Amino acid sequence: MGRYKTPQKPGSKYITPEGAQRLRAELTHLWKVKRPKVTSALSDAAAEGDRSENAEYIYRKKQLGEIDRRVRYLSKRLDGLTVVEHPPGDHTRIFFGAWFRLADLESCEFVYRLVGPDEFDFHRAYISMDSPIGRAVLKRSAGEEFTVTLPDGDKHYSVVEVSYEPIEENPEE
């Protein structure tokens, strides 16, 4: 048995303009700010003598490798992404970039935005279109019900609202 890992299926190649801007800003910060600082610290550590026992040198070398890996990934990923500038013509169904409200069997409501895999963020309620819920809600409209298989079992939801503008978390009754 080797250490071979099967490659992951590439994620969807769609991103919102805000998500693309965030990735570009990260790439610029890594390349123009963080990498020069780490390179400078690495050369200072290298000047201190024996590199084999120099913890600072070893740490900076590893940090530089991580930065370079992320820069390569972001450069390659940004080249292959499609920025979705405009919402689709049908505003009644859930497509990329849509905000939607789901209700479960206990009448708990959840508001999410459907985004690409590069910009999902649980704290902002952004879910990836490649996630189980993301795949299940795609092309659904308000009033539709569906069941999705999640790691903790099957969940039943209904789509309450679809919008291409942000939805308030707690609607007024």
Image: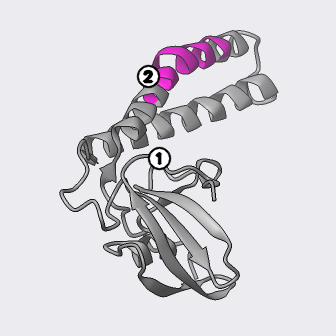
At x 51% / y 80%, what residue is drawn?
A: 158
Picture quadrant of residue 157: bottom right
Query: Sequence-wise, which precedes: disc 2 or disc 1?
Result: 2
Q: Nearer the viewer, residue 93 or 34?
A: 93
Tell me which secondary structure the magenta stretch mostly adopts: helix
Q: Which residue is mark 2?
A: 28
Residue at 45% in and 74% down: 6
Q: Is residue 32 above or below residue 51?
A: above
In the rendered image, residue 138 lying in the magenta stretch gets the answer no
- Residue 33 visible to an observer of this rendering: yes
**In the displayed structure, does residue 154 sit left or right of residue 161?**
right
> Which label belongs to residue 46?
none
Answer above or below: position of 12 versus 15.
Answer: below
Apparent side of residue 59 relative to residue 91 in the rendered image (left or right): right
Task: Tell me where residue 149 appears, x and y as whole percent.
Answer: 55, 87
Q: Is residue 54 visible?
A: no
For the point 33% across and 61% down, the residue is: 12
Q: How many marks?
A: 2
Task: Tell me the crowding category of disc 2: few under 14, some 14 to 19, or many 20 or more residues within 10 angstroms, Cα based.
Answer: few
Q: Image quarter for residue 60?
A: top right
Amino acid type, residue under disc 1 in the picture:
Pro
User: Whole-percent x and y of residue 141?
Assistant: 35, 73
For the residue marked with disc 2, what is the amino acid?
A: Thr
Task: Tell me which segment is drawn in magenta.
Answer: 27-41
- Relative placement, left or right, of 55 versus 117 is right
Mark 1 nearby-residue class (10 Å; few <14, some 14–19, many ≥20): few
Q: CA distance from mark 2 to mark 1?
A: 28 Å
- Residue at mark 1: 166
